[in-house]
Amino acid sequence: MASSHDDPQRLNPYAPSAIPQPLVPLADRGIGVWRDGPDIVMHPEATLPRYCVVTGEPARFGYFLRIAWSRPLDITPRSLGLYIPLSAQVHYHCRNRRWQSGACFLAACAIAALALIRTDIAGAVGIAVALSLWLVVSVLALFDYVQYSQFLYFASVEGDYLRLKGADQRFLQRLPEWNV
């Protein structure tokens, strides 16, 4: 007696399709990256070419950036994880600036904590000065950190395409012109 496992008519869910699927290039589906003046226009499924967005040189490093947006009359947020290609020089410069920003923030926290711990020496005026200094340095460090972490900025959505700002002209020259 034959078991159901020996039945050739039984459907195997892991078997490849008997009808080959046509290979549709991404560009034919409208997936790509273009330039429109100073802006980048891209489909969310596309990836940026491997050239630095700051210098236009071939990129060896990159930075992962999450871009969030929503459509008009639709409050559902959408997000896109985008790999931003960077040259070695830009990568190291921005990494060092982010480390410096973090060090400034920690130094300001240490000064404020020391003033709070040693209230008998600092007094109320010393605490107020230390906390004011901490606030100013914290805001400046945060601004500096964000400035050296954000390479492209979301501008708008046009149909299925995102419009990004902030790329250098040398990078944009490598992209085809947006013709719509």
Image (spheres, grey):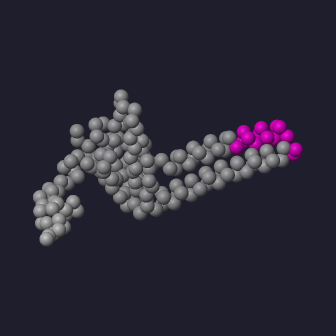
Residue found farthest to the front: 1
Residue 144 is covered by the magenta coloring? no
Residue at 36% from the left image edge and 28% from the top image edge:
73
Indicate whether residue 127 is drawn in magenta: yes
Answer with left or right where residue 64 lies relative to residue 163: right
Task: Please state the horizontal and vertical placement of residue 70, each as a whole percent of the image.
Answer: 38, 36
Residue pictured at 79% horizontal, 41% vertical: 127
The answer to whether 156 is drawn above or below residue 12 in the figure is above
* Residue 95 drawn above or below residue 179: below
Viewer-closest of 138 and 177: 138
What predominant SS class does the magenta segment belong to? helix
Q: Nearer the viewer, residue 131 or 75?
A: 75
Residue in the picture at 27% in, 49% down: 32
Q: Which residue occupies 88% across, 44% down?
A: 120
| Residue 102 seen anywhere in this rendered image of the structure | yes
Give the residues in magenta.
120-134
Q: Quadrant of residue 23?
A: bottom left
Residue 13: image x %, image y %? 21, 60
The residue lying furthest to the bottom in this view is: 1
Q: Is residue 152 left or right of residue 135?
A: left
Residue 38, can we see it? Answer: no
